[in-house]
Image (tube, grey):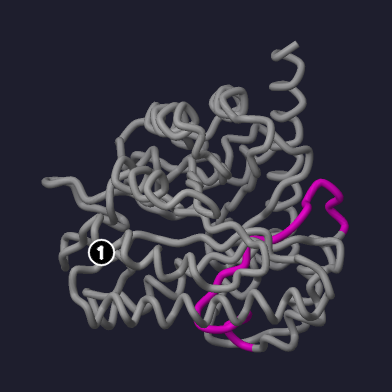
Amino acid sequence: MKPSFFIGAYAASPQARNPHIWNPVAEGEYFRALGELKSVGGLELPFQGALHPHDPAWLLEHFNPRWKAVLTPLPGTMERLRLDPTFGLASTSESGRRAALEFIRSAQTAVHQLNQKFGKKTVVAVQLHSAPNQLRAKASLHSFVESLQEIQCWDWQGAELWIEHCDQFIAGQTPAKGFLGLDEEMTAVHQLGSPFGISLNWGRSVLEVRSPEGALEHLDSVGSQGLLKALIFSGACETHPLYGNWEDSHAPFANPEMKSRDPTGFERLFLTEARVIEALQMLPAEAVLGLKIQPLPATLSLEDRIHWVKESVSFLNFCMAAAKREAR
């Protein structure tokens, strides 16, 4: 477990108030506030086809030189799935699979752009996903491995390739993502080896299993096979007035310091101090950590959003220190 961590800051960005209207002034203030958080070692950047959905040049100028980056094409993948249900690296539709490969090829270009800007290896990993949603289209391990074999041959300038597990398709259960199962994704990594590994999102594992124990089960499965590269802390709820019912909505930590901000739903937040510490204690020393929370409602001010992020970072730092003490 490394001392600094990544933050999926886009989920808490002021842009979330109205994603289609670009406000570089507010986003600039937000990035400056993020830069003051010394334990934040980098950002998880959403990839939708370019380094930034509105202005890639702006991102290159405002990305803190001390930060590293993890690129996640999931936002772009979900956009494309709405237009073409067969889109995805695991799709049995050849046209859907080729479209996904072309999309990931554009992510490779973004990796080169960010590294070139800073003259060093800035992008440490790119996350890949086993779409499509099997409620709407067919997917297979064979198709996924075939795609990964091609991606493996591209020049990633030293970036690792993490298969980020999202909730799998389970008959009779409404999925948030509905991708391949964790066992299939681990099989793919075993077949291909470096630079592939598995990254887990605490909340996504929980909503798949429909229990907070799901995150520990997945951590144990991946960790026992030596495949775990990263764990992202993002919460989940069975029912919540803002974060919904078993939705992939990046619910926050159950942080007592923030209870007054969510008096009606606080007790429904699954990501408690004890559960964070328990998960941290299962991580190998080299694992990358991250957090991603979505402050709600969407009308929250920039100041409120920054406060949510700062408190979340402080909470994770507190839990990391507690896990370290208990391990002695």
Provide the secondary structure element on which disc 1 rests: helix
Q: Nearer the viewer, residue 63 or 101?
A: 101
Q: Nearer the viewer, residue 104 or 254?
A: 104
Q: Which residues are magenta?
A: 36-54
Query: Given the image, on which type of amino acid does mark 1 rest?
Result: Ser
Of helix, strand and loop, which mostly describes the magenta segment? loop
Q: Residue at x 20, y 52 (%)?
A: 174
Instruction: Say which residue label 1 marks.
Output: 143
Residue 315 sits in quarter: top right
Q: Nearer the viewer, residue 53 or 184?
A: 184
One can see residue 85 in this view: yes
Q: Residue at x 76, y 66 (%)?
A: 121
One can see residue 244 in this view: no
- Tell me: residue 299, above or below residue 62: above
Image position, residue 14 (x, y; %): 65, 71
Q: Is residue 109 left or right of residue 101?
A: right
Image position, residue 217 (x, y; %): 39, 28
Residue 268 sits in quarter: top left
